[in-house]
Amino acid sequence: MARVVVLDYGSGNLRSAERALRRVGADVTVTGDPHAALDCDGLVVPGVGAFAACMEGLRSVRGERIISRRLAGGRPVLGICVGMQILFQRGIEHGVETAGCGEWPGVVDRLEADIVPHMGWNTVRAPEGSMLFAGLDPDTRFYFVHSYAARRWDLEPNSTLPAPLVTWATHGDDFVAAVENGPLCATQFHPEKSGDAGAHLLRNWLKSV
């Protein structure tokens, strides 16, 4: 059974994520302990609310360093919602710019849509070869709650490494809905709130752990 830590840094649907991961067979611990977060088989980084507040909480538990060290060792990390957004280089909310973890270049900013926040069920466009979305129909819907997103993908191709697989969705304009980048995966939607579809995706992720 895969040992998964849901990182507790003061933000995120911790218990929802814990229940969803237990449902698909993971041995789950919710903790902010750096040693546990480094030693587990898979690390989940949730997040809700403001980019800046999430980064402040993440730094308080040395979360940036934990993520970086895990990825350097090829050990799986899954970011969810704002836990995905903080993996980018920076976020801009209400005119305030905040540095993110910088695992990917690019900026997270406000969606351009008639209705914000984007709240509810939406389809996504997963690329061929996706591990996260394997076995799911193209019309499968996932649950989103967000006002901000990465609306561009700025990482240049690297001939020595496999290209990241980027999944897109649309609300007003296109935005990044998920990324699969070696041991680092992330979703803008909430798999833990997406019913059977979310459980299927989490089960797929656990296969990589």
Image (cartoon, rainbow, N blue to C red):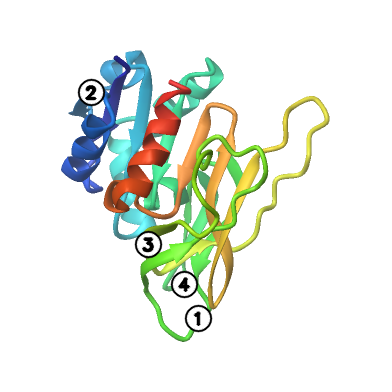
Marks 3 and 2, Cα distance to the nearest angstrom? 29 Å
Q: Is residue 22 visible?
A: yes
Q: Which residue is mark 4?
A: 95
Image point (36%, 27%), residue name: 43
- The tag earlier along the polypeptide, 2 or 4, is 2
Residue 42 horizontal/vertical position (percent): 38, 23
Image point (23%, 23%), residue name: 33
Q: Is residue 132 left or right of residue 143?
A: right
Judge the density around disc 4: few (<14), some (14-19), many (≥20) Cα neighbours within 10 Å.
few
Residue 21 horizontal/vertical position (percent): 27, 33
Residue 4 horizontal/vertical position (percent): 30, 23
Q: Secondary structure at mark 1?
A: loop
Q: Nearer the viewer, residue 184 or 16?
A: 16
Residue 110 horizontal/vertical position (percent): 48, 71
Marks 4 and 3, Cα distance to the nearest angstrom? 23 Å
Q: Which residue is mark 3?
A: 144
**Could you tell me the amino acid type at mark 1?**
Ala
Q: Which residue is mark 1?
A: 113
**Could you tell me the amino acid type at mark 4?**
Gly
Judge the density around disc 1: few (<14), some (14-19), many (≥20) Cα neighbours within 10 Å.
some
Q: Nearer the viewer, residue 93 or 127?
A: 127
Q: Are marks 1 and 2 in contact (CB under 8 Å)?
A: no
- Toward which corner of the image does residue 152 lie, by quadrant? bottom right
Please tell me whether residue 205 is drawn above or below residue 192 in the rendered image.
Answer: above
Judge the density around disc 2: few (<14), some (14-19), many (≥20) Cα neighbours within 10 Å.
some
Camera-near label (4 vs 3) is 3
Marks 3 and 1, Cα distance to the nearest angstrom? 14 Å
Marks 1 and 2, Cα distance to the nearest angstrom? 39 Å
Q: Which residue is mark 2?
A: 33
Q: Secondary structure at mark 2?
A: loop
**Could you tell me the amino acid type at mark 2?**
Asp
